[in-house]
Structure formats: C-alpha cells, structure tokens
Image: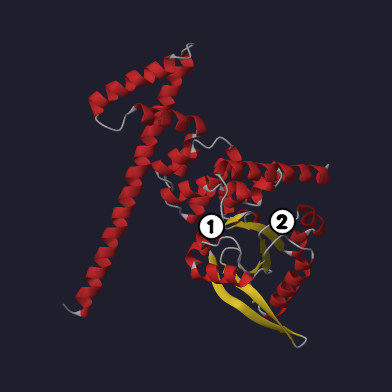
Amino acid sequence: MDKIEKQAISKIMALIEESTKQAALSVNAIMSSLYWHIGREIKIVLLQSQKPEYGKNFIENLSKVLTEKCGKGYKKTNLFNALKMFEVFEDEQIFHALSGKLSWTHLRTIIYIDDPLKRAFYLEMCKLERWSTRTLQERIKSMLYERTALSKKPEELIKQELQALKNEQKISPDLIFKDPYFLDFLGLKDTYSEKDLESAILAELQSFLIELGNDFAFLARQKRITIDHTDYYIDLLFYHRRLKCLVVIDLKLGDFEAAYKGQMELYLRYLEKYEKVEGENLPIGLILCSGKNEEHIELLDLEKSNIRVAEYLTILPPMELLKEKLHRAIAHAKNRNQRENG
C-alpha cells in the first residue's frame, strides 16, 4: 500500500467517524424532542384534571399502552422524566437548542436540580467544557456550584455572569475558582509539611488538574524569581487558557495569615512586569490553606489585588456536614454582600 492510498484511507476513516458522530447526535436530538413532546401532551392532560391522583394513574396506563404498542423505552420513570423535562423547559426553541448540544441523559440529570441558577450553571458549563454524563454527575455530586466563588455572589450578578457565559462563552474567575478544594486523592494524613503537600500534588498532577478544572496547564514547580538580589520561589505556576493569564498557587499549612497577602502580591507584580506577554490578562494568585480566618480575608479585600484564598481538604468529612458547611458559607457571603450594598 503506497502513501497516497494510506492518506485516502485515513481521510475516509475520518469521514466515517465524523458521520457516525453526527448520526448519534441527530438520533439523540430526535429522541429528546420526542420525550419533550410526550411530556407536553401529558401536561395538557394533567391540567384538564382536577384530581391529584389522576396524573399518576394516567401515566401508568399510558406506559402500559405505549410499551405494548411501541416497545421498550416508555416505562413510567421515562414518562415522568418527559413530564419533568417539559415543565423545566417549556419554551420549545430553548429546548431545541439545548437538545442539539446535550444528550437526553445530560438533560435528564440536570432537570432535577431545583435551583434555577444552579441548574443554569451546570447547563452552561456542561456545554462549554463538553462534559460527559459521568463528569456532569461527578461535578454535581462534588457540589461544584456551591464551591464556586460565583455561588456566593448576589443573585443578579450570578444571572449576569451566566448570561454572558451563555451568549458570549465569556468566562470569569468566579466561575473557575472554588472553595474548598478536595485533595483527598493525595493520601495525606496526620502530620505533613508544605514540601510533602507539594510533592504529593506533583505525584498526582493529573488528579490535581481535574480538581482545578478544565483549561489549567502546569508550567513550573518552585519557580525562582530574583528581586533585589533576593531569591523567592513560587510553589506552583499554572496558565489558564480561557482566562488567558498566569495563575500562582501558594501552598500553606494552617490558617490564612495576613502576611500571605504581601508575599503573593510580590509574586503577582513580578510576573506582571517580567513574565506577562501581550494579549494576556493580569496574573491571579490562589493561596491554598488548610484553614481560613474569614475576618482577615474580608478586611484585606484580597480580590482587589487579584488574590483568592481557599481551603483545601485532604480528608473529606461526611457529605451532609460538608453540604451544611457550604450552605452556611454561601449564606454568610450573601449577607455580607447585602450589608456592603445596603
């Protein structure tokens, strides 16, 4: 087989793969559309009835008839999913646009998120980063939304950022950075040093990058910078492709201390002056601590210096305790925003 034949075969294989992919997307969109229309018809019937138990009985009867006449795929659970799908996405044009980008399984997972802002977050991030269904489910289970800085902002600001993400694919640091970070995969227990923490992260770099999120690229460990004949070492240096900026990560044991701000500011100003290239945005600093002093962080107003502080957890508490902690943090942040803006 000569070179020309090999190239032709390679091109034909690529065409077949792309065609197969498009066919799968088309089938998925048709199936999603079918379930949406079934959900609409069920809703119409339910609205005409005054009896609360009528809906359940109707769906049971409908499932029996459809299964007998049309085959599998019309179990009661699927019909309830179809109804829920219509109730969440009543606008057919909006649903049509979504079903062209996300599978029925993606949509079925998202519709049971009650909070509209939280649901919109997962919809837009899923489209932007092309999450698999498994990744979406893992993100929801890990409470990604509750851990983002965005979730702690005023409701109107959350809506604006999600709208910008939807219409312009414009992403902000509030969508990217989280608190806390789950580092249980490092296997660190009891007593360990900052060097141990850094070494464990480098040994599990792929898992650390997954926890950081898409679009982070690792650049350096213990990057040396020299200022006035004094050497300083940046723990970890990354680049974020969509934010178009360098990201400095400083690892700390114990609670956050005010002195950490000055150290990080020095790193950021150095990188801005000597490392930042044309077209890049200002560097961002992330200080990872095993604990936080909230009042210190509030008084220092770190975001004005492009600095963020987050807690890391090497051992995860029970999920209910974690959920309660995150909800308290969101409520505290929103109360603080109301005080500041009120």
Amino acid at the residue labelled 1: Asp
* Residue 143 at x, y percent in the picture: 56, 46
Secondary structure type for disc 2 = loop
Q: Residue at (79%, 67%) from the top-left corner? A: 259
Q: Which of 66 and 221 is in front in this view?
A: 221
The quarter of the picture where the C terminus appears is top right
* Mark earlier in primary sequence (1, 2): 1
Q: Which of 184 and 272 is in front in this view?
A: 184
Relative to 8, residue 53 above or below: above
Residue underneath mark 2: 292
- Residue 184 is tagged as 1
Relative to 153, residue 289 above or below: below
Within 10 Å of the Cα at label 2, are there few (<14), some (14-19), or many (20+) other Cα atoms? Answer: some
Q: Residue at (63%, 73%) from the top-left corner? A: 235
Drawn side of residue 90 relative to residue 133, left or right: right
* Residue 244 at x, y percent in the picture: 60, 67
Give the CA distance from mark 1 to mark 2. 18 Å
* Residue 268 at x, y percent in the picture: 71, 72
Q: Residue at (24%, 30%) from the top-left corner? A: 71
Q: Nearer the viewer, residue 283 or 29?
A: 283
